[in-house]
Image (cartoon, rainbow, N blue to C red):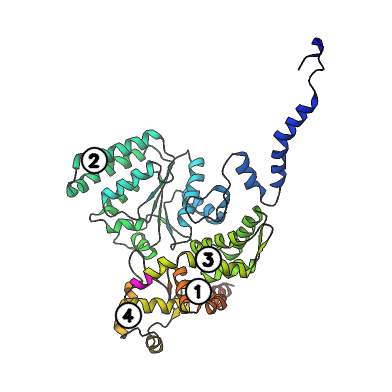
Amino acid sequence: MFSPQEGGRGLSPRPLLFFVFVKFIPKIWEYKKYSLPCSKIKKYMYYSKKIFPTNPFFITPETPEGFLVPRDAETKNLVRMLDNGANVVLAGDRHLGKTTFLLQMLRQEGARRGGCALYVDLEHTRTTFDFLEALMDSLRGRGCCTFPESFCQDVTGAVLRLETLCGGCDEYRQEQARWVIDDVFDMLRGYPYATVVFDEFQAIERYPNRMAALLRSKIQLMQTRFVFAGSDTRTLYDMFGSYSQPFYCSASYMRLDKVSLDAYADFCGRMFSLYGKAVDRDAVRLAYELVLGDLLALQKVMAATFSLTGEDATATVETVRDGIDAVLDNADDAYRRLYLRMKDSDRNIVTLAAERGLVQGIMSAGTIQAYRLGPTSSVLNRVKKMTEGEEPVLRRRNDIYFLSDVLLGLWVARVRGRLEERLEKAPRLYSEYADSLKIKIPGALSLDMTKRNRK
């Protein structure tokens, strides 16, 4: 092209307009397309150049910012307790989203309390040295860690030197590990506004030495705030509530309950609307009541339901049923092998719990005879073993028993031809389950009666 001074026609506006149209109109269209209810998440993901997930229902602890199941009230409560200067015991059953909740809280606390937060998973630890290795893994980035790089390098170097010094001598390594723990907590004293979470903290009860006494002697002299989380509620409460334990009355208590049906239904509605879809609240209610509010199973079912729902379509009760079938089909081989490996006595108890959903009066003569459970004393011992241990097969709430893995129960019910019956009585079963969560104290007055007497 030539300039006007050279006799040319000058720069035509048409190529410039075409360039603007091609470059910017698609982005404006994308912005407008995201201007829907709950569009802030999409705009954030788009302009921060983050990958937008194909399915908004995550089943892993590492969940993006906008796709977390809301627990605002629980987060505020935990943060308030930490701000009041208390260490906190956080108890909650498995598959409630406890790890995701803690990671999200730590990210917020790390940004608010000087950037120092640490999450340590102790679930698979057995010794003091395993405790140090779990701490080192967290500092290396296998968890939530916002401590300075110098602190991470110092702790990691101390653990690696211990491993090199002791070699394969486990007894000497366990003995020296206690001195390294002293050094680590001395380093932590330099960060008085830090927050540290020990998940599955009840695991230290398995250690061969008195690890609880060592940690208690260090933690009580620090300004760093600690959260002791765990899924074995009985052991965790005994550690902090028994007079003979080192941690007796050294922390406040908080219980993490299931996400309410209304909150989860609103969450599902927002997630479906982000992708131009919709979901009936009755469909969410069916999935919620069928899995007894188990968040992990619920996310799996809703993820399958979401993938089966077409664009601009609405997920109904039938779609949720198809999603349940899809989840059970995917797990068919694993559950079949697990079911066949069980002893006959255990398999009969699992079948009983799967077909009924909730079992009350498991020791009754009619139940024992109908499912061929064997002698009463043998059944009592088997049930006790199945409700104890690190990964119990059965759970007990007052006098009601149910399977820990609700999807396994649904799979067994489908194999036995009882799935439709489970679907029909899901509301009644959930109502009985909700009543079983209320701790019944003999001779205690009800709340309404107490208020009436006060007046």
436 and 272: which is toward the camera:
272
In the shown orientation, is residue 331 left or right of residue 274? Answer: left
Which amino acid type is shown beneath numbered disc 1?
Answer: Tyr
Circle 1 sits on which residue? 433
Q: Earlier in the sequence, mark 1 or mark 4?
A: 4
* Real-space Cα separation, disc 2 to disc 3, in angstroms: 49 Å
In the shown orientation, is residue 38 left or right of residue 357? Answer: right
Which amino acid type is shown beneath numbered disc 3?
Answer: Ala
Number of residues whose C-alpha sits closer than 10 Å to that of mark 3, classed few (under 14), some (14–19) or many (20 or more): some
The numbered disc on residue 326 is 3
* Real-space Cα separation, disc 4 to disc 3, in angstroms: 36 Å
* Real-space Cα separation, disc 4 to disc 2, in angstroms: 47 Å
Dominant secondary structure of the magenta stretch? helix
Circle 2 sits on which residue? 162
Q: Earlier in the sequence, mark 2 or mark 3?
A: 2
Does 36 appear in magenta? no
